[in-house]
Image (cartoon, rainbow, N blue to C red):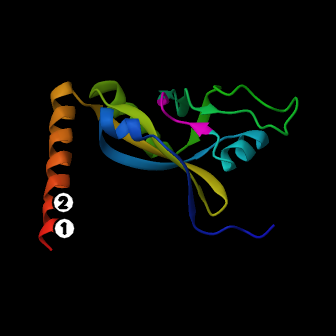
Amino acid sequence: MPHQRGIKPVAQNKKAYHDYFVEETYECGLCLKGTEVKSMRQGRVNLKESFAMVRGTEVFAEGMHISPYEQGSFSNSDPLRPKKLLLHKSEIRKLSGLVSRQGYTLIPLKVYLKDGRMKLELGLCRGKHLHDKRDAAAARDAKREMERALRQHE
């Protein structure tokens, strides 16, 4: 099988951008089993209720649902098992300090294939309040109205 080049999106967590301010993003690898990779290549992954936790010197993605592979047998694993994320030690130390002290949370934003390997984009996020969500919706609607008016004018 030839080596795949480029980035192929698999899944996105659109709800995260609605509920959180994304301060920084990190690209990290995933420790997966074979049938999980095959299932993810088919796009059978859900990131909606997922989050990441720092445990000691490791980071784990919790609540990330990977549907069992249909052609798999006994080798299928639990769809909601914690998946270990591969980050540099310095990044883990930085994230651990920010999450424990300053009220940030780690949210998986998207999963994609990069040169044949599964990668996860992890966001360092701060929660939005209700008025922040309303402001964002109002700004989005205003921008849409302006674009519509410009198209009608031309």
Q: Quadrant of residue 75?
A: top right
Could you tell me if the residues under marks 2 and 1 are in contact, i.e. CB atoms within 8 Å?
yes
Cα distance between the residues tagged 2 and 1: 5 Å
Callout 2, which amino acid? Arg
Is 35 positioned to the left or the right of 26 in the image?
Answer: right
> What residue range appears in magenta?
45-52
Task: Bin the neighbour count of mark 2 within 10 Å (Cα to Cα): few under 14, some 14-19, many 20 and up.
Answer: few
Is 138 positioned to the left or the right of 63 in the image?
Answer: left
Determine if residue 26 is in view. Answer: yes
Task: Find disc 2 in the rendering and name its residue.
Answer: 148
Q: Position of residue 144 (x, y in %)?
A: 20, 53
Q: Position of residue 147 (x, y in %)?
A: 18, 61
Disc 1 is placed on an element classified as helix
Q: Quadrant of residue 117?
A: bottom right
**70 magenta-colored:** no
Determine if residue 94 is in view. Answer: no
| Residue lying at 63% horizontally and 64% vertically, measured from the top left | 115
